[in-house]
Image: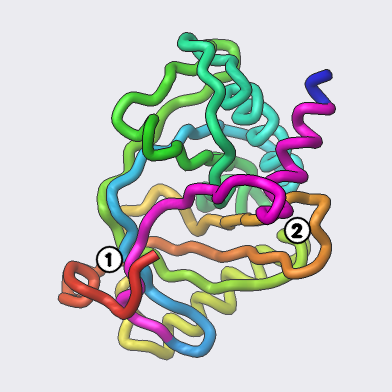
Amino acid sequence: MENQRMLSLVLCFGFLGLCHAIESPQYTVVHSESDFEIRLYRQSTWMSAPAKDISFEKATKFGFHRLFQYIQGANLNFSRIAMTAPVLTSIVPEAGPLHSSAYFVRFYLPVKFQASPPLPLPELNLKPNAWDSQCIAVRKFSGFARDSNIVKEAEKLAISLSRSPWANATSSESSYAYSIAQYNSPFQFIGRVNEVWVEVDASEFDGCKSSGVATY
């Protein structure tokens, strides 16, 4: 039964025309180039699942499985929580021979639960994670996010940033090397959207504090 519910959820996640609009964290684009953009994300709350595995793919599946249980009612309020996007996997730097063996898989909480998230059951090992307003450098890529391509995509973003006015803006205070945002169900094979996120220290850039190009 749980597998059937999960299948329905991921199918809904992948084919938005069959479901209600999925909520996402709000942001403003403050700088845009051909291969990346800088976004100012508003304050938000996420539910976070720590996962240790040499494989990004296995860690993401393990973390999302626990988050799925949480949104299906495995919380102290027995609340059912709507799916949101993206599912975000943050990579902890210098934690293993293949760039990482520690991850945090995150679920953006819908607006109605932002101020007061339902507490997860203790055995799920989940914690709410409050984000301050912050600037994120973002690079889009298509296909599936795999162990074989995420590092290459992160390196491409780093090269693009090094050739831009944001060259020295990578945040030294971030706990994560980078994050991978996935927007589609694993059952969707065409038109997939993924992103590499890197936090930037935008204290020197007024645009990251004020009005931008577009708001989403």
The amino acid beneath tag 2 is: Arg
Whether tag 1 and tag 2 are in contact, CB under 8 A, the answer is no
Disc number at residue 48? none
> Mark 1 falls on what kind of element?
loop
Q: Quarter-wise, where is residue 53 in the image?
A: top right
Report the front residue among 188 and 57. Answer: 188
The quadrant the C terminus occupies is: bottom left
Q: Specify the segment rendered in magenta.
A: 4-32
Q: Which residue is mark 2?
A: 146
Q: Give yes or no for residue 27 being in the magenta stretch.
A: yes
Mark 1, residues whose alpha carbon is within 10 Å: few (<14), some, or many (≥20)?
some
**Residue 39 seen in render:** yes
Give the percent coordinates (x, y) of residue 46: 43, 38
> Mark 2 falls on what kind of element?
loop
Q: Give yes or no for residue 75 being in the magenta stretch.
A: no
The quadrant the N terminus occupies is: top right
Q: Which residue is mark 1?
A: 201
Left or right, 60 with reference to 143: left
Report the front residue among 31 and 101. Answer: 31
Give the percent coordinates (x, y) of residue 204: 17, 74
Give the percent coordinates (x, y) of residue 157: 52, 76
